[in-house]
Image (cartoon, rainbow, N blue to C red):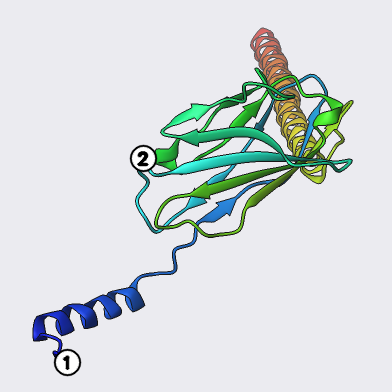
Amino acid sequence: MYGKSPTRVVLLLLGIQLTALWPIAAVEIYTPRVLEAVNGTDARLKCTFSSFAPVGDALTVTWNFRPLDGGPEQFVFYYHVDPFKPMSGRFKDRVVWDGNPERNDVSIMLWKLQFDDNGTYTCQVKNPPDVDGVIGEIRLSVVHTVRFSEIYFLALAIGSACAIMVIIVIVVVLFQHFRKKRWDERAHKVVEIKSKEEERLNQEKKVSVYLEDTD
C-alpha cells in the first residue's frame, strides 16, 4: 500500500479549508410579495436577487404561475443569456423581459391583465455555484379599481397638510401687507393734519403781528 505524497496531502488540506471558508451558496430573492393592479392594465412583476457568485452567462431565471383557483403550475417566462417567451398558453404575447442581470434585476412585464391572472407568480434564480435558496413569490390581485392603501391616505394627508400650511402663509403675508398699508395711511394722515395745523398757526401768527403793527 502506497502512502500519499506530501503535495497531495497539502492540496487536500487546502481544499478542505477553502470549502470551510466559502460562504453557503444560496441566492437571496426579493419580491413585493403582494401586488394589486387594475384589469386591462399592465403590471411589472418585480424580482431582484443577491448572490455571492458574480453574475455571468450561467445565470438562469424561471417564472411560473399558480392559479388562484388551483390547478397545475404554468410556465410564464425563462431567461438564460437571452429571454425566452412562452410560445403557447395564456401568457403568449403577453409577457416581456424587463430585467437587467447586471443590476441583479430579473423582473418581467405582464400585459393586458385579466381577472383569471389572479394567483401566485414565482421567481426562481440560479447563479452557479449559487443554485439553492427560497423561491420568490408575488400574489397578484386583478381588480376593477385600485383600493386606497395606507400609503395613499398618508400621501393625501401630507398633501393636505402642505396645502393648509401654504394657505396659512399666504393669509399671514396678506394680513401683514394690509396692516402695514393701513399704518402707512394713518401715518400719512397724521402728517397732513400736523402740516395743516402748523400752517394755521403760522397764519394766525402773521395776523397777530399785522394787528400789532397797525396799532
Q: Residues within 10 Å of mark 1 (few under 14, many from 20)?
A: few
Q: Given the current orientation, which residue lies at the most extreme left position?
A: 6
- The residue where tag 2 is placed is 57
Residue marked by disc 1: 1
Mark whose residue sits in front, 2 or 1: 1
Q: 10 Å neighbourhood of mark 2: few (<14), some, or many (≥20)? A: few
Distance between mark 2 and mark 1 Cα atoms: 45 Å
Q: Which element type, helix, strand or loop, lies under badge 1?
A: loop
Q: Is residue 196 above or below residue 121?
A: above
Mark earlier in primary sequence (2, 1) = 1
Seen in the image, is 199 located left or right of residue 5? Answer: right
Name the residue nearer the viewer: 106 or 5: 5
Residue 81 at x, y percent in the picture: 41, 33
Q: Determine whether label 2 and label 1 are within 8 Å by CB.
A: no
Q: Quadrant of residue 115?
A: top right
Q: Is residue 14 left or right of residue 133?
A: left
| Residue for point 50% across, 40% down | 105
Residue found 15% across the figure and 80% down from its top = 8
Q: Is residue 208 above or below residue 19?
A: above
Specify whether 143 is left or right of 159: right
Image position, residue 119 (x, y; %): 80, 40
Q: Secondary structure at mark 2?
A: loop
* Residue at image coords 69%, 12%: 203
Residue closest to the eye, 27 or 58 = 58
Q: Quadrant of the C terminus?
A: top right
Q: Amino acid at mark 1?
A: Met
User: Label 2 sits on what residue type?
Assistant: Asp
Q: Nearer the viewer, residue 25 or 32?
A: 25
Question: For residue 19, what is the image quadrant?
Answer: bottom left
